[in-house]
Amino acid sequence: MRPCLPADREYISALVTRFSEFDLPDWRSTDEIDRTNRLSLQKALEEPKPCAAILVAEDETQDPVGFVNLETQVDYFSGEKHGYVADLAVSKSVEGRGVSHMLLEVAESRVRSSGYRLLTLYAFSANARAKRVYERNGFQPELVKYVKGMRQTSKANELNVGRPAL
């Protein structure tokens, strides 16, 4: 495990598609997910946030096989700062070989040494593979975001005529 180097940018960018390799909700597209994640990671690489770190896992030949983007956030309820796994991805070739576990262990170690009480992350509800990894590593679901896609119809548009937008 090592800090991210400028030479890792291409590798990390190539892993972005891993974040959309499951059945997305109807109101999300693969292009939207990949584009947004690519831009977010590009910004994290070019303008790192204070107390943030992108760490890269390597295989025995020192080739990158995964990464974790670790940041801090503030808990909505307690107001406490805590560790936040903004991104975690591994190469398909090493899936199931413990690389995600190792990345999460290193993230946990850094969070503990910073004195934080929590480590959080988000996962799409349909991303069963990611949820299994997180739950095997001691994460528990806390909040569930509910979404209802709004399809615009001519009837709905007629009802909104003259009303201010939300």
Image (spheres, rainbow, N blue to C red):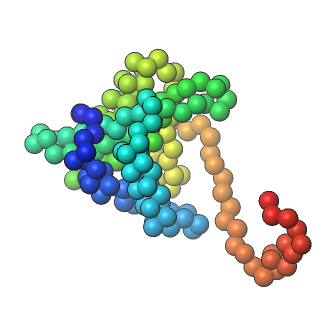
Q: Nearer the viewer, residue 79 or 124?
A: 79
Q: Looking at the picture, does residue 22 appear above or below residue 138?
A: below
Q: Is residue 118 left or right of residue 113?
A: right
Q: Quadrant of residue 67?
A: top left
- Is the N terminus in the top left, top right, bottom left or bottom right quadrant? top left
- Tell me how many marks there are: 0
Q: Residue furthest left?
A: 61
Q: Quadrant of the C terminus?
A: bottom right
Q: Residue 148: x percent and y percent?
A: 68, 61
Residue 22 visible in the current orientation: no
The residue sitting at the right extreme is: 162
Which residue is found at the position 34% from the left and 48% from the top?
A: 89
Tell me, yes or no, if residue 39 can be seen here: yes
**Quadrant in the rendering for residue 152:** bottom right
Asked whether, in this view, residue 5 is left or right of residue 48, the answer is left
Q: Residue at x 65, y 25 (%)?
A: 78
Answer above or below: position of 17 versus 62: below
Residue 49's spot in the image, x, y percent? 45, 36
| Residue 90 on image: x %, y % | 30, 48
Residue positioned most to the bottom: 154
Image location (x, y in percent) of residue 42? 39, 51
Q: Residue at x 81, y 75 (%)?
A: 156
